[in-house]
Amino acid sequence: MSLRMSLKNLIRRDPSASLRERANDLRGSLSRRTVVAGTVAAAVPLPALAGTVQPSPEEAAFLALTPAALPILRRLIPAQTEMTRLDIEAEAVNGGYPGPHDEGRRRAWADQVSERRKSNGFGAAWEAANALDDELTAIVEGYDRVPMRTPAAILFKVALDHVGEWWGESALDDLRRLAAERFDLPNDSAPAA
């Protein structure tokens, strides 16, 4: 999925939310990722787990992509951050979204946002982020549906959450599967495609 589709899920479009609330919500989303990763690291001693699990051939092929993928990801993350900053800045015109009830004000606001996006560099930032997203997606596409067992592969999936939230969901499914095996629990993770 391209950045175009994941951007819709990244930016909250609550018409009653202030610019500060929307920015905090975005930061909160990133913080939740950090909390989940930290919780997983605390709950599963990764060095101990790493010594006991050998990657499958598909998993080894996925891990072999890291030298090509990580430099792109290191450029994509700040590009997405800048694009989002410019979008939030553009939408803050005249106090933000006026709400859906006054069609005239809503249309005027949308026109002003469009003009601000043209003048503040949002279009160029979007193009840059989308090009990096497409480049990275071409490298890793399809591996989100491959069950992984090694910590390195699961962490790589978490890092790829910047391409789309389904990568983080896939990593969580992998961890659920491992937890079910480790603690003899029913496996409620999503089936691999």
Image (tube, grey):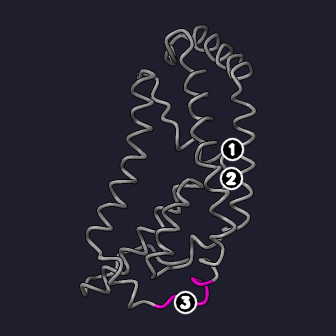
Tell me the CA gap for discs 1 and 2. Answer: 6 Å
Q: Which residue is drawn at 35% across and 74% down?
A: 176
Q: Name the residue under label 1.
A: 129
Q: Which of 126 and 2 is in front in this view?
A: 126
Type of amino acid at the residue the image marks with label 1: Ala
Where are the magenta residues, as a range? 54-60
Label 2 or label 3, whichever comes before in sequence order: 3
Q: Residue at x 47, y 72 (%)?
A: 154
Q: Where does the image place residue 99, in percent across and percent down from the top left?
A: 49, 17
Q: Name the residue under label 2.
A: 133
Residue contact between numbered discs 1 and 2, judged by CB atoms under 8 Å? yes
Secondary structure of the residue carrying numbered label 2 = helix
Residue contact between numbered discs 1 and 3, judged by CB atoms under 8 Å? no
| Residue 56, numbered label | 3
On-image quarter of the N terminus: bottom right
Type of amino acid at the residue the image marks with label 3: Ser
Is 31 positioned to the left or the right of 147 in the image? left
Q: Nearer the viewer, residue 103 or 81?
A: 81
Q: Which residue is drawn at 75% across and 40% down?
A: 127
Q: Where does the image place residue 81, in percent across and percent down from the top left?
A: 57, 39
